[in-house]
Amino acid sequence: MSIPQLTADDLFAYQQEALKLEWVAGKEGKDRLLENVNAVYPGIALVGYLNIIHPNPIQIIGPHEIKYLEQLPKEQYIKTIEGILQNPATAMVLISDGLRVPEALVQLSEKHQVPLLGSHSTGPQVVDYLQHYLAQMLAPRVTLHGVYMEVLGIGVFVSGKSGIGKSELALELLSRNHRLIADDAVEFMRVAPDVLVGQCPEMLSNYLEVRGLGVLNVRSMFGETAIRNRKKLHLVVNLKAFPEKGASNIDRFQAELATHRILELDVPEVVLYVASGRNLAVLVEVATRSYILRMSGNNPADDFIKQQQEAILNNNQ
């Protein structure tokens, strides 16, 4: 698992146009790492309005905050600003609504090398936009070997040992009008407490490698609709070689789905055994349909058990 590094300069570069940002002062602190500050204070949101006691890493100052600061006596005004800028939790200060930046704040930002940015967007817009952006950019992530597909609108990660047929399965699913997200290397991010999103590394985007055929450009061969950039993960399909001792040890009932742990989240998992004559693409489609039914409260195994119990009770009467 890794957490990407994001600096104040990165944020400015990515969001300059969207939030109409401009550097005001403190450019020498442009390499401050936003996520390191948050790791030290994990209970504090990354973005928030002016907070003197528990400052957010990115402090937003709008009209109300400016009005509050200007009402303070000069000595307390300077002390308050210095307290914010000297706090190790503060990584950046952003003035919203196109407001005039107080000269004292400019001078102290330069002194303490704290990035000071201005934005012509409103405070609520800045907070909402940055919270969403930072949740995506700073989410814990991991890269796993496998193929990631969208099957019937569901994010399905196909895992298994190298050479077991993952890419061939992906090709068959593509021919059945499903969509490829990533082949070989899939980057998963935990963007919310219970949400994993998978995407393809930029270098591998649009490509599928199949033994005997080489590298295929899926977008060119199957069209724009055959590719999806990212998708929430719902189901893991684990391909395994058929056991040498036969099917005696295989759970054929599967009343409960197994789980696969990714980034501390348990994802429902179905194990499919690869053997001659088995149509894996159809099996993946059915596994996906079964998952959809389970998520809506319908469990065929439970229904079967109840049906058998009722039949036994009726026969005993």
Image (cartoon, rainbow, N blue to C red):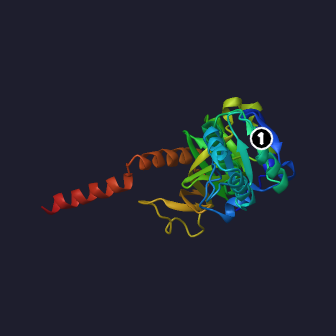
Between 209 and 101, the one lying in front of the other is 101
Residue farthest to the left, as pictured: 317
Asked if residue 145 lies left or right of residue 306, the reply is right
Residue 144 appearing in the image: no
Between 138 and 89, the one lying in front of the other is 89
Q: Which residue is mark 1?
A: 14
Callout 1 crowding tier (Cα within 10 Å): few <14, some 14–19, many ≥20: few
Q: In the displayed structure, would residue 289 be above or below residue 193?
A: above
Q: Considering the image in quadrants, where does the N terminus appear?
A: bottom right
Between 188 and 88, the one lying in front of the other is 88
Asked if residue 145 lies left or right of residue 213, the reply is left
Query: Looking at the rendering, which quadrant does residue 67 occupy?
Result: top right
Q: In the displayed structure, would residue 269 be above or below residue 156?
A: below
Tell me which residue sits at (69%, 51%) in the image: 77
Tell me which residue sits at (73%, 53%) in the image: 78
Query: Looking at the rendering, which quadrant does residue 56 occupy?
Result: bottom right
Report x, y in % for residue 311. 22, 57
Report x, y in % for residue 111. 84, 54
Residue 140 appearing in the image: yes
Mark 1 falls on what kind of element?
A: helix
Mark count: 1
Residue farthest to the right, as pictured: 28
Tell me which residue sits at (77%, 52%) in the image: 6
Q: In the displayed structure, would residue 228 be above or below residue 239?
A: above
Report x, y in % for residue 74. 71, 50
Between 101 and 1, the one lying in front of the other is 101
Q: In the displayed structure, would residue 42 be above or below residue 94?
A: below
